[in-house]
Amino acid sequence: MVVRLRLARLGCRNRPFYRVMAADSRSPRDGKHIEVLGYYNPLPGQDGGKRMGLNFERVKAGLLPPPPMVAMGRKGGPRDTRPVDPLSGRVMMPEQSTKAGNDSVDQENKP
């Protein structure tokens, strides 16, 4: 069972109000849920801001970063060994310190 965080819509027409819920991925948006974790009111209040409240202790308890992904060059080919960011799944590029070194060499050769 895959648990997802969802916004279940409540309120009237043109005046939405949402509850942040933990629900099974197969259940519908406003259907059966496991637990109510908070609320979200997109309409501006008296101070002009939107309102949101979460039970952070319950939300943090179940969050895990996604598993690290290993990019493949092609199907059946060698695997790419570059490091992958575990949160975004994108390949992390090493810092390019060689540019700074090349610039100083170019300046020394100029008369």
Image (spheres, rainbow, N blue to C red):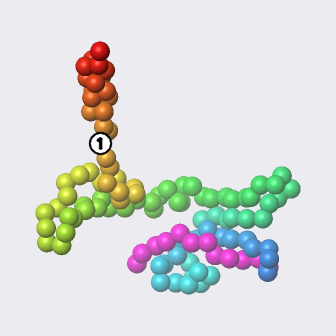
Q: Name which residue lies at 46% across and 73% down.
A: 3
Q: Position of residue 67 (x, y in %)?
A: 32, 61
Q: Is residue 4 above or below residue 30?
A: above
Quarter residue 48 falls in: bottom right
Q: Is residue 82 above or below residue 8?
A: above
Q: Position of residue 88 (x, y in %)?
A: 40, 57
Q: Which residue is mark 1?
A: 94
7 inside magenta stretch: yes
Observer-nearest of 71 and 7: 71
Q: Considering the numbered disc 1 on the image, is that residue within a helix, a strand or a loop?
A: loop
* 17 displayed left or right of 47: left
Outermost residue toward the front in this view: 111
Quarter containing the N terminus: bottom left
Outermost residue toward the top in this view: 111
Q: Which residues are magenta?
A: 1-12
Q: Name which residue lies at 57% across and 55% down.
A: 56
Looking at the rendered structure, the kind of residue marked 1 is Pro
88 inside magenta stretch: no
Q: Position of residue 55 (x, y in %)?
A: 60, 58
* 14 displayed left or right of 24: right
Using a 10 Å C-alpha cutoff, classify the residue at mark 1 as few (fewer than 14 neighbours), some (14 to 19) or many (20 or more): few
Q: Name which residue lies at 30% across and 59% down.
A: 68
Q: Name which residue lies at 78% across and 65% down.
A: 43
